[in-house]
Structure formats: C-alpha cells, structure tokens
Amino acid sequence: MPSTYFYDPAAGHGLPHDPFKAIVAPRLIGWVSTRAADGCLNLAPYSFFGAFATFPPIIGFCSEGRKDSIANIEATGEFVWNLASKPLAQQMNRTSAPVAAEVDEFALAGLTPAPGRNVNVPHVGESPAALECRLLQVVRLATLDGTPMDNWLALGQVVGVHIREEFLKDGLFDTHAAQPIMRAGYRADYAQIGEMFQMFRPTA
C-alpha cells in the first residue's frame, strides 16, 4: 500500500495550507444573482455549489457568512444561478469584490441583467446558461455537537432554464463549448474543462 498523510481536521492539518478545498475539486461556481426587497440587484460567486436532485431539479449553494445573497433570497424567495464561463472569468471575479449591499454588481462588472421569465431576478445575459430558482429552504449549518456555524445553505427548485442557442448541438447542451470554469484548489486556483470522455452505466 502507498504511504498516506492523515490528519484530524479538529486538530489541524499540519500543512502550509489547508488541503480541503484542493481535494474536493473542481467545483462549479455558484454565480448567484438576487434582488433585494428594495429592488437593488446583487451578483456574487460562491465556492460551494452543487445540484442535488433531478425531478424536480434542485440546486444549492452555501455562503460562509450571512451575506447579501442569503438575505435577499430569504426576503424574496428567488434567485438565479449563472454559468461562469472562461470568457466571463474576469467579470465573475469582479463580482466577488467586498462592496456595500447597495452596489449593483451587474453594473460593476459590465454585465447585462437579462430579465427573468418565472422569477423577478435577472440573469447574466452573457452567460451560456442560467437557472431560475424559487427558494425551498435556507439551512444554517451546525457542527457535530450542535454548535451553529456562520454557514448558510440555500436550496432552490429550478423553475426556469435559459440556454443560449449557440450552445445547443443536436438538442444537447454543449458543455465543452460553454467553457465552464471551476474552483480547483487554493485561493486563486481555477480550472476549465479539458478532454471529455464517455462511460455508460452498466445495465447489470
């Protein structure tokens, strides 16, 4: 057996940098647009994002700290996930700036707020795809001993899907052509899709 490095997270990793985010990688970016109760738009990327169900489709993201996105979603019950692509990487990064709640990150990053169809929240018009969501629940995470954490998980049911037509090929969404970018390690590490391969699930 090859040798392994083991550590208990509660005792510390003992390495120059915490490897957790580099191990659980790559991760699609939760590029989330919301609208505050007063109408102000917000757009922010989140490192922890995923899909959790298909029928109906459910997605979620987790905020480290109770940030504007969570407050807006709780106030309005709506949000949109936008696919962050390689051509939009710099604009996505710009929306991560720690600015005041009243700052519109669409304008800050020079992005187009395209109107929603089933929600009153715009999506990034330049994004290859976007998912309109209605809130199912916001869950404050807790540790094993029940201590509340400053981490907030928002789960939403997808109620509308936007796909730019140039990314539909023979009725399939062309993920490779869309060039999604992902978090892939430490503070400044990102990845993009390289070679793809097919492997079908066994029937028995």
Image (cartoon, helix red, strand yellow):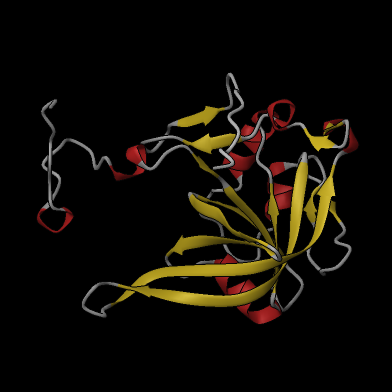
Farthest front residue in view: 204
- Residue found at x 87% / y 37%: 171
Residue 112: image x %, image y %? 82, 46
- Residue found at x 24% / y 73%: 144
Q: Is residue 177 left or right of residue 21?
A: right
Rendering quarter of residue 186: top left
Give 102 or 58, whichever is nearer the viewer.
58
Residue 124: image x %, image y %? 77, 48
Q: Is residue 96 left or right of residue 187?
A: right
Look at the picture and state if 9 lies above or below 79: above
Q: Is residue 68 left or right of residue 114?
A: left
Count how many numbered circles sit on residues in the image.
0
Q: Quadrant of the C terminus?
A: top right
Q: Is residue 196 left or right of residue 123?
A: left
Give 126 or 202, whichever is nearer the viewer.
202
Residue 104: image x %, image y %? 70, 57
- Residue found at x 26% / y 40%: 19
Give 90 or 183, whichever is nearer the viewer.
183
Q: Quadrant of the N terminus?
A: top left
- Residue found at x 13% / y 33%: 4
Look at the picture and state if 203 lies above or below 54: above
Farthest top residue in view: 195
